[in-house]
């Protein structure tokens, strides 16, 4: 990870088990879905089904 992509303090928090959990803000700033089933995934990826269950939050609904 390069220094310019280093997450800021409000981009993540530590779970009670000690894992780093990225926030929705950081995942949107990163700009793509990693398909790992992130807790705060703004892209709607469901790791159990391997599919996207909902549209990206910043997409406008189609008419």
Image (spheres, helix red, strand yellow):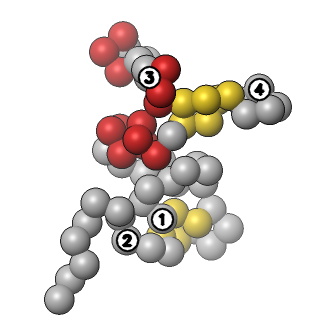
Q: Check contact, mark 2 vs mark 1: CB within 8 A.
A: yes
Quickly name the residue at label 3.
7
Of the numbered discs 2 and 1, the one sitting upstream in the chain is 1
Q: Is residue 58 above or below residue 29?
A: below
Of the numbered discs 2 and 4, the one sitting upstream in the chain is 4
Quickly name the residue at label 1.
44
> From mark 3 to mark 2, how far is it between C-alphas?
25 Å
The quadrant in which the N terminus is found is top left
Q: Is residue 59 left or right of residue 5?
A: left
Residue sitting farthest toward the right = 17
Of the numbered discs 3 and 2, the one sitting upstream in the chain is 3
Q: At which x and y percent is residue 3? A: 36, 10
Of the numbered discs 4 and 1, the one sitting upstream in the chain is 4
> From mark 2 to mark 4, how far is it between C-alphas?
30 Å
Quickly name the residue at label 2.
55
Assess disc 2: are there few (<14), some (14-19) or many (≥20) residues with their C-alpha within 10 Å of its C-alpha: few
């Amino acid at each position: 990870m390069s220094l310019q992509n280093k997450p800021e303090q409000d981009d993540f928090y530590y779970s009670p088990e000690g894992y780093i959990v990225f926030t929705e803000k950081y995942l949107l700033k990163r700009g793509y879905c990693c398909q790992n089933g992130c807790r705060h995934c703004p892209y709607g990826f469901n790791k159990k089904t391997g599919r996207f269950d909902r549209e990206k939050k910043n997409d406008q609904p189609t008419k």
